[in-house]
Image (cartoon, grey):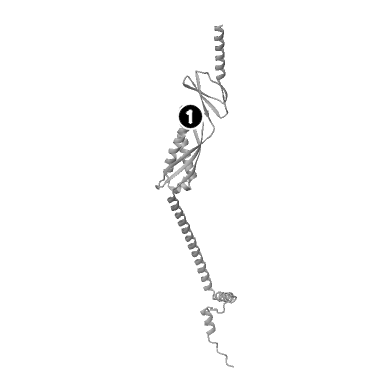
Amino acid sequence: MVFGIGFGGIVLILFLLFIASFRVLREYQRAVVFMLGRFWKVKGPGLILIIPGVQQMVRVDLRTIVMDVPPQDVITRDNVSVKVDAVIYFRVVDAAKSVIQVEKFLAATSYLAQTTLRAILGKHALDELLSEREKLNLDIQRVLDTQTDAWGIKVTTVEIKQVDLNESMVRAIARQAEAERERRAKIIHAEGELQASEKLLQAAQMLAQQPQAMQLRYLQTLGHIAGDKSTTIVFPVPLELLATLTAPLPPKPVA
């Protein structure tokens, strides 16, 4: 009787162990399997068999992970202190390396992203940090991807989210932008004056070559002024016209 109960218990334990040996992995999961402490193979997805007591497995998620990089204090190349935060997108491409080569690859990637962010941005001036964000994103992404390749991780995208400046620096940038706008306005005004003077010079040269054209221009101006409601008109008369009017008449021929 005792033997029968013991045999039944053993059978039940073996059955439970057999059931527990099966694991179901989803499409985006892989199992890194160790046999007696040594790496054996990567299994999944689907139904896999793990020998209890002999084999152990570690689940690894292959989906893209979105990680926020906490705000970092960065001193730019021109000695301006700013706070910069970012977001990185990465995924595991080699499940075995992500388990064997690094402990807690999520934390390791986060810390590496923080130090890389400070190192890369510290090499650039504030103007570059504000205007060349796309280029900086690519630089950070390439450095992170190179360093995490040994961990079986692929960094696909890095995006700088926000650059925080103190109030004094914001006011200084506003003054600089206003001065730049005034400079451009003065340059445009000066270029307009130069073009106008060139056109006036061309017109003066053309009128000088044709005195009759100058007289017609005076008459047109007189017509415009006469249409106004002013009662007194001071109109300059060209010297050539005065000379023509005051010239002595030719003597009459003697009959």
Q: Residue at x 46, y 43 (%)?
A: 84
Q: Which residue is outermost to the front?
A: 1
Q: Residue at x 55, y 12 (%)?
A: 9
Q: Quadrant of the C terminus?
A: bottom right
Q: Quadrant of the N terminus?
A: top right
Q: Nearer the viewer, residue 171 or 106?
A: 171
Q: How many marks?
A: 1
Q: Which residue is outermost to the left?
A: 79
Label 1 Cα neighbours within 10 Å, binned few <14 / some 14-19 / many ≥20: many
Q: Does residue 69 sit above or below 15 in this rendering? A: below
Q: Residue at x 46, y 33 (%)?
A: 107
Residue 254: image location, x then y, percent: 57, 92
Q: What amino acid is labelled 1 in the image?
A: Ser
SS at badge 1 = helix
Residue for badge 1:
98
Residue 183: image location, x then y, percent: 46, 58
Q: Nearer the viewer, residue 77 or 241?
A: 77
Q: Does residue 202 sit above or below 117 in this rendering? A: below
Residue 142: image location, x then y, percent: 47, 38
Q: Does residue 131 sit above or below 13 in this rendering? A: below
Q: Nearer the viewer, residue 252 or 127?
A: 127
Residue 21: image location, x then y, percent: 55, 19
Q: Nearer the viewer, residue 247 or 238?
A: 238
Q: Does residue 53 sit above or below 252 in this rendering? A: above
Q: Which residue is outermost to the top?
A: 1
